[in-house]
Image: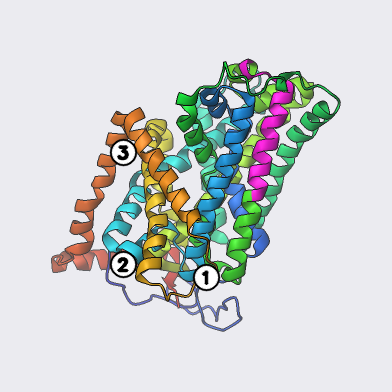
Amino acid sequence: MPLQSPPPVCRGGGSGGQQNGPSEDQSGAPGRVKLGKKVTLLRGVSIIVGTIIGAGIFISPKGIVRHSGSIGISLLVWIACGVLSLFGALSYAELGTCIKKSGGHYTYILAAFGPQMAFIRLWVELVALRPAAMAVISLAFGQYVLEPLFMPCAIPPLAVKLATTIGITAVMYLNAMSVTWSARVQIFLTFSKLLAIAIIVLPGLYRILTGETANFDNMFDTSRIQLSGMPLAFYSGMYAYAGWFYLNFVTEEIENPERTLPLAICISMAVVTSCYVLTNVAYFSVMSVDELLASDAVAVTFAERVYGGFSVAVPVFVALSCFGSMNGSLFALARMFFVASREQQLPTVLSMIHVRRHTPLPAVLVLYPMTVLQIFVGDIYGLLNFMSFMRWFFIAVVVLGLLYLRYTQPDLPRPFKVPLFIPVVFCLTCFFMVFLSLFSDPLNTGIGFAISLTGLPAYYIFIHYNHRPRWLQKGLDAVSRALQIVLEVVPAD
């Protein structure tokens, strides 16, 4: 809800309005309070890789195998999904270099199709999708960080939820206190993920090189191939690659975005695709298709057969991987809420910055209450099923916006421009997955669509019709001033 921006309470820090001395921005200019350009190429790669590679590749990468039916076809699907994801990422790279604003999906839909469509996307993210997605990956963190302590016994559900809450609180605190340290932690966690993948890939490749290739005999077994399941296999694969768009959420904080954004995307997608394909090859070097489908945690089963007692380390790596996804997601999503507030589609306080730490503190904290609530009481997995098709629908709308902007604004500077067939192929693929979900799961898809439609009345109530009673506006302004004082935030310069 847009609020009238109240006069700044302080500019130098201190909740009582006292000036504690000048602060400096990235360039050293005194008295400036803004987000600095602290995302380098390495940090950009770590954001994308660290967010894409979550728990799935270590726990249960069997959805593609189940729907494709054979080892050879499943590996081809992994490669094809990597290429399609690269197409989407390159399309976003063009948008990010010609629209140099943070915010990702929201910013690009706003530029192409206007505030109403952008607000609906924002509404879906804020009220349902992002809190649920953050809660799911956080619960995976809580489950696997406690696994070594409780093996072989079951972990009490309350203990998982408490560990999950501690984890999400730590991520929120880190992002609220320092952009630099959140980026450094993300780099460390990304290298931890790559180390975990190397621990799986290297012995798998060694087994193949020494001739243990029995599972790869007749890898394109036609009796097991299920053509009817191929669309669902691609759906599973594209879900595993989701996250390539997060760097576009922090465009304003990227050093030299015209060069860094496309390069970081290309490097990241090459790394992720290679890791996914090689990890699956390693799994198949130890397990047959039937054994893989029977395993609840593929990486644990692999480690038990290859490393024996060392397999206890796998849950630790999974927990670190989940923590990296939590950190990267929050770092990026906070910038979307920051930009939406700046566009007067969320309360003004969300576009304010901490006077000393130069972090978007209110935007970082806004997801915390909903996420913790869903951790304890929400039907999270059901909600994700409702909203999954909307994710791909709006991504397709964004790429469609790229084509629309090429037609309506041909003279817009485009330092990085992709061939036309790349956004066209990706856009058609996304819409195909959306229509597939309408037929394969009409109930959950319909509920998700209904949740999204609630953004229309919300837009007209909170954004379009803004003639509030004077007493209500004064109350909202008072709340905004109080939050400024408590959080020590001021409008960005």
Q: Is residue 418 left or right of residue 194?
A: left
**Place of residue 102 in the rendered image (x, y in percent of width and height, measured from the top left):** 47, 65
Farthest-out residue, right: 210
Image disc number at residue 448: 3
Marks 3 and 2: in contact by CB < 8 Å?
no
- Residue 304, by quadrant, is top right
Magenta-highlighted residues: 270-290
Give me the residue at 57% from left, 15% from top. Answer: 223
The single residue placed furthest to the bottom in the displayed view is 30
Q: Find numbered disc 2 in the image and state the secondary structure of the residue it sits on.
A: loop
Task: Name the amino acid, label 2.
Answer: Gln
Is residue 282 magenta-colored?
A: yes
Callout 3 secondary element: helix
Q: Main secondary structure of the magenta part?
A: helix
Q: Residues within 10 Å of mark 1 (few under 14, many from 20)?
A: many
In the rendered view, tell whether residue 116 sits above or below residue 280. Answer: below
Quadrant that contains the C terminus? bottom left
* Crowd class of label 2 (few under 14; some 14 to 19; many from 20; radius 10 Å): some
The residue singled out by tag 2 in the image is: 344
Q: Residue at x 31, y 74 (%)?
A: 6
Task: Determine whether, in the image, residue 193 is placed left or right of residue 475.
Answer: right
Separation of residues labelled 3 and 1 (CA atoms): 35 Å
Q: Earlier in the sequence, mark 1 or mark 2?
A: 1
Does the rendering let one see residue 346? no
Rendered image: mark on residue 35: 1
Residues tagged 3 and 1 counted as in contact (Cβ below 8 A): no
Which sits earlier in the primary sequence, circle 2 or circle 3? 2
Q: CA distance from mark 2 to mark 3?
A: 26 Å
**What residue is at 45 percent from the left and 59 percent from the top?**
104
